Image (tube, rainbow, N blue to C red):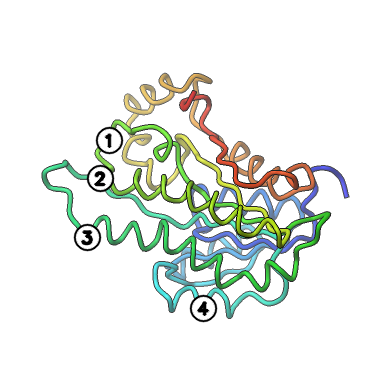
Amino acid sequence: MTLFSVEGKTVVVTGGSRGIGRMIAAGFAAAGAKVHITARKAAEVERTAAELGCSSVVADLSTPVGVAALEAAVDGPVHVLVNNAGATWGAPLADYPESAFDKLWNINVKGVFYVTQRLLPQLREAATADDPARVINVGSIDGIKVPSMETFAYSATKSGVHMLTRHLAKQLAREHITVNALAPGPFESKMMAFALDDPATRDAISASVPLGRIGRPDDMAGAAIFLASRAGAYLTGTVIPVDGGISC
């Protein structure tokens, strides 16, 4: 096995039908991993799975029923779990609804925790001292620095994902399971479409990135593959910004 190989590993990517989840799933599939992707919408996840050559699981991971459906659908050891499924919500401070915090807490934080909890037996089955099982949580630079947009629940929950990552990492290290987080900056996704679809706003966002551009699919896939390969085997409890330098 080469330093950055993930060939033959079983990988689960939640929220893998589009955006950052699809970028990560496509990278693993192209690198020879056996990939399972999840999403709430059956047509969308099945279409993406057919395009990428992976398997699909229809599940709403903000609910116990959805988490149980994922657990039942994935057989055998799981070498890599990518907790990517998430949501955002923007509204002015005076109008920001309680329902936003409830929805985003359930999917962005509770979903990460309970999917990891339910798949622990399969992660343990895959884990060895030389090649740990990996959990990769997708946080956000908005959980590191205060965003300019009024996305209060999103930034708070993504910061929660980062702390949950560190807490799980400390707990699971003795079982040869690493837990790390990626904190993306601006990438092409449904969450960013409202900004990136407008040429002027897109140019302004690109100009705010020290490296001068929006993130590309290979940028995100490469970071995830690094964490899942032999090259990333000695990292745990880290939060890695994949943001072109915005968080510097």
Q: Position of residue 105 (x, y in %)?
A: 35, 58
Q: Is residue 226 above or below residue 13?
A: above
The residue carrying mark 1 is 149
SS label for mark 2: loop
Distance from Cα at disc 3 to Cα at disc 1? 18 Å
Q: What's the CA distance linking mark 2 and mark 1?
A: 7 Å
Q: Nearer the viewer, residue 153 or 238?
A: 238
Q: Tell me which residue sits at (58%, 80%) in the image.
A: 72
Q: Give left or right: position of 244 versus 7.
A: left
Location of residue 29 (image quadrant): bottom right
Q: Which residue is mark 4?
A: 69
Q: Which residue is mark 3?
A: 99
Going by the numbered disc 3, the residue's amino acid type is: Ser
Where does residue 89 sit, x and y in percent of width and height? 28, 49
Which residue is at a point 38% across and 34% down the rendered structure image? 196
Report which residue position mark 2 lands on.
Answer: 90
Residue type of the residue flagged with mark 1: Met
Identified by mark 4, the residue type is Ala
Which of 144 and 149 lies nearest the eye of the viewer? 144
The residue under label 2 is which amino acid type?
Answer: Gly
Q: Distance from label 4 to label 3 (Cα)?
A: 25 Å
x, y (%) of residue 112?
48, 60
112 to 140, vertically: above or below: below
How much space separates mark 3 and mark 2, taking CA atoms? 12 Å
Category of crowding for the residue at label 4, using alpha-carbon neighbours closer than 10 angstroms: few (below 14), some (14–19), many (at least 20): some
Sequence-first disc among 4 and 3 = 4
Which quadrant holds residue 11? bottom right
State yes or no: discs 2 and 1 in contact (Cβ < 8 Å): yes
